[in-house]
Amino acid sequence: MPPHNLHVNIKAMTHTPSLDDPIQFIKGVGPRKAILFEKLGLTSIEDCLYFLPFRFEDRTQLKKISQTVPGEYVTLTGEVLNSGTMFMGRRKRLFEVIVQDETGVIRAKWFQFNESYMKEKFKTGQKIILSGKPTVNKRSGLEIIHPDTEQVTGENVSSLEIGKIVPVYHVTDGLHLKSMRTIIKNVLDKYLHLIEEFLPDDLVLRHNFPSRAEALAQAHFPPQDSSLKELDSFKTPAQKRLVFEELFLIQLGLACRKTRTKGEHTGTPFKTRGELIKRFVKILPFTLTRAQKRVLGEIMEDLEKEKPMNRLIQGDVGSGKTIVALTALLTAVDNGTQSALMVPTEILAEQHYLNIRPFCEKLGIEISLVTSALKGKERQSHFENIQAGRTQIVVGTHSLIQKDIQFKKLGLAVIDEQHRFGVIQREAIGKKGDHPHLLIMTATPIPRSLALTLYGDMDVSLLDEFPPGRREIVTDLFFENRREEAYSRMEKQLQQGRQAFVVCPLIEESEVIDLKAAVTVFDFIQENFPQFTACLIHGKLKKEERQDIMSRFLKKEIQVLVSTTVIEVGIDVPNATVMIIEHAERFGLAQLHQLRGRVGRGSHASHCLLLAYHPISEEGQARMKAMQNSSDGFIIAEEDLKIRGPGDFMGTRQSGLPLLKIANLLRDIQFLEIARKEAFHLINRDPGLTDQKHQRLKKALQRFLGNYMELMEVI
Ligand code: ADP
Ligand code: MG
């Protein structure tokens, strides 16, 4: 026996199989295949077990060729009449197999093939089975492109491909569906006995779930009598259980996190509605909306407690979050602590600073702005003031979580536009103090399913009312041939004393190129509307220049503000009533909605004018339509999720969210709610999962969360 074989044998003898085994332990997976599997994100046995088919094909019924309907998936059996390579044009080749049964002929065609292999496989007279979606070719009639095929031999009884409901997996170049099926089957045969139940018995009973092992086996290779419709919509008992399992583990992690932040650590209880707040309310230029009062009430209740607040405010653009935040910031100051407001961009930080500073001046509160633009001595002295506690409110970007910035006593941190930050930053700002209260604000109304997952460990307040006197924003779409019409709409508004934003999109990940596009638009406006003052603002300008432009815009010295997308969030100019978005088709829905929210902030009717240019993708069209159809952020968010699909929605790693392997937040929302209820219920009864009968669950949870850094330390 050659030595390397010996080695393998010894390994096989001594190794105790585990779900962590690399997939090379499976028959049929060598180093080359292992690389292909890795491309799919699959390295271990467990990965494979949870790599579920995304659709199924019903091959339980063999049809006759004459029964096929173009466009409908079919499995046929017949005999090879003829086969061979055909040439079409100079370099294009295809391999064609003509198959016949007693009712007719059909052609199978491959554009990528290994000629000698195909010739060998499809010899004239060979009986074969083929599956696929037939189409009609004008010249040659019925055909199937790249069908799954199998030679009919005596062994077909045990085939994975034929006479069954057959799973379809995502594969990659060089890895065929057929070998994927075989390998997964081998994985199941060899490792399924290792799969233990970890869900509590009563829960399994209550929901009538199949066991975990059973569910995994059937989710890959469903029983003969399964309904294809149920399978494809992921609603068989096996699939439902696996979806539940995944969502349950996430919610369990969140529940643990929530009880931890609520339980163990004690923060600083505040006295609320103190002197400072009373003075502040007096200088407020308006009365708070009912929603603002309610949300503030919820915040105050949290702040009075010893447990640190961990609250999210969801409020659409323009719903008045800033004042709510400022009230909280001042409450912290009133209690002798410092407070911080962290935002994702410098411009927004500057904006908030400019908005808040006048109030602070009147109240005699020291406020400072910290961004990366702060350099040298100035930076030094800002930092010293913060460390000494002389600065009471700090507004800034993620510069706030740098190592060298230290607070004397940070009592409250507010994060605005949270969707731009990950969970990591949320934690980092919290570490700048001794369990400070935490308030997160987001203007991106995310779909409920996502909120429950992303912010599942927080208390949520809804700011669901706009300040009074708001006028509806009219949203219109213009293609390039009507561009002038859009700009003359702007002109009319300017003539009435209003102001306008013109936003130019991110074209490439290069600010230089972006800027060029914005400059072109800027020139166009100066040329065509010389009677108005226009200004160009972008990320490359110095802080002072930007601040200067913004304050001149606020003072109405500038009528048209042309900008790159840097002004996306948070800017507040009530007299601006026109938002022109150039190349609107290139923006995402959330971004478009944010931009639109820049107008409609005063008492005048406002206009959001979307300028789109061909070619425009189907998704782009859907986005334009969604914008025209609704101005409700939540509806927009749901549309966004539908258009992009959950994969992409969450795929932006930014979300700080575990990527779901099985569950789909669009499809499985009901399950999410059930899983959440069950998880929180369980953690309420057994907070540390210490009960003997929850030990397997605890282990499963630790293993599961181990994959998601930021949730890891919850248990
Ligand atoms: P967002 O929720 O988008 O951050 P802002 O806090 O910037 O909204 O508020 C939008 C505008 O509404 C600002 O001009 C703000 O001064 C104003 N505003 C906030 N609350 C009220 C209110 N209760 N009554 C009138 N105007 C308000
Ligand atoms: Mg805001």
Image: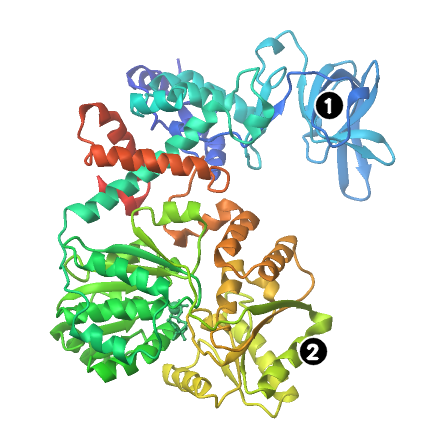
Check disc 2 and report its element: helix, strand or loop: helix
Residue 396 drawn above or below residue 28: below
Quadrant of ligand 1: it is bottom left
Residue 324 drawn above or below residue 306: below
- Look at the image and name its color scheme: rainbow
Check disc 1 and report its element: helix, strand or loop: helix
Tell me the quadrant of the picture where the C terminus can be found: top left
Tell me the quadrant of the picture where the N terminus can be found: top left
Q: Where is residue 397 drawn, in percent x and y?
A: 32, 69
Q: Is residue 258 left or right of residue 476?
A: left
Looking at the image, can residue 160 be seen?
A: yes
Badge 2 crowding class, 10 Å Cα cut-off, few under 14, some 14 to 19, many 20 or more, is few
Residue 428 drawn above or below residue 280: above
Residue 319 drawn above or below residue 360: above
Tag 1: amino acid: Lys
* Residue at numbered disc 2: 484
Tag 2: amino acid: Glu
Q: Which residue is situated farthest in the right direction here?
A: 139
User: In 3D space, how far apart are the residues under numbered discs 2 and 1 (Cα atoms)?
Assistant: 63 Å
Q: Is residue 699 left or right of residue 442?
A: left
Residue 102, quarter of the rendered image? top right
Q: In this view, does 291 lie to the left or right of 219?
A: left
* Residue at numbered disc 1: 119
